[in-house]
């Protein structure tokens, strides 16, 4: 049986992989369904996987930051997520656009479709290693772009968490 919250939303969990830095898996019903692994300890290049699908994600830009999304092994952009300073993002995949709202460091982020309907809510949890839950409203599980949106949403959460940790270290140091 799938864990559900009081509204009937399906509950999923992003968990860090033991012993592996910058590597997380997304669990549903106790089974890993997706993963996110950064290529090295400090860069922004990461690979996200969902079943047979795989994408590379890379942050770029300074004054106008964005994340490129490509199918793994391809140089052609599948989408480009434009990031705001508030932690929100917008991406167009094919001819369909999505918005990620919310999102300062450790607050929840919500993926919305172009009509404003909720596709997923990502809630990070404070701990020594970042983890979090994802709520998927009933009827959304089969949405064609949901796998990529969940991986991209967690990627953005990881980057925000690391930026927050670096900022706190510089203030304390």
Image (tube, helix red, strand yellow):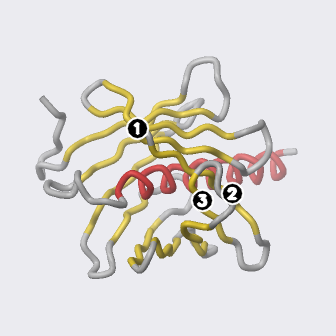
Q: Mark 2 touching mark 1, by CB under 8 A?
A: no
Q: Nearer the viewer, residue 129 or 25?
A: 25
> Closer to us: mark 2 or mark 1?
1
Residue 13 as seen in the image, left or right of residue 157? left
Which quarter of the rendering shows the C terminus? top right
Q: Secondary structure at mark 3?
A: strand
Based on the displayed image, in which of its 4 quarters is residue 146 positioned? bottom left
Give the residue at mark 1: 51
Q: Mark 2 touching mark 3, by CB under 8 A?
A: no
If you read the primary sequence from the N terminus, does the residue marked by circle 2 or circle 3 appear first? 2
Based on the displayed image, in which of its 4 quarters is residue 68 positioned? bottom right
Q: Residue at x 41, y 77 (%)?
A: 97
If you read the primary sequence from the N terminus, does the residue marked by circle 2 or circle 1 appear first? 1
Based on the displayed image, in which of its 4 quarters is residue 129 positioned? top right
Q: CA distance from mark 3 to mark 1?
A: 16 Å
Q: Residue at x 64, y 66 (%)?
A: 76
Find the residue positioned furthest to the right: 173
> Closer to us: mark 2 or mark 3?
3
Q: Secondary structure at mark 2?
A: strand
Give the residue at mark 2: 58
Q: Mark 3 touching mark 1, by CB under 8 A?
A: no
Give the residue at mark 3: 70
Q: CA distance from mark 2 to mark 3?
A: 9 Å
Q: Residue at x 11, y 49 (%)?
A: 8
Q: Is residue 92 above or below residue 166?
A: below
């Amino acid at each position: 049986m799938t864990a559900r919250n009081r509204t009937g939303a399906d509950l999923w969990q992003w968990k860090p992989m033991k012993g592996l830095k910058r590597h997380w898996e997304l669990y549903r019903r106790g089974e890993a369904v997706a993963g996110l692994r950064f290529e090295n300890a400090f860069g922004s290049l990461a690979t996200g996987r969902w079943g047979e699908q795989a994408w590379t994600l890379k942050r770029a830009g300074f004054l106008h930051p964005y994340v490129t999304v490509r199918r793994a092994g391809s140089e052609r952009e599948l989408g480009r997520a434009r990031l705001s300073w508030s932690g929100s993002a917008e991406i167009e995949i094919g001819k369909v656009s999505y918005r990620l709202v919310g999102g300062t460091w450790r607050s929840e982020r919500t993926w919305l479709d172009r009509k404003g309907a909720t596709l997923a809510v990502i809630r990070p949890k404070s701990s020594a290693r970042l983890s979090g839950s994802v709520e998927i409203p009933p009827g959304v599980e089969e949405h064609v772009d949901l796998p990529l949106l969940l991986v991209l949403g967690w990627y953005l959460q990881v980057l925000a968490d690391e930026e927050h940790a670096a900022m706190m270290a510089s203030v304390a140091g």
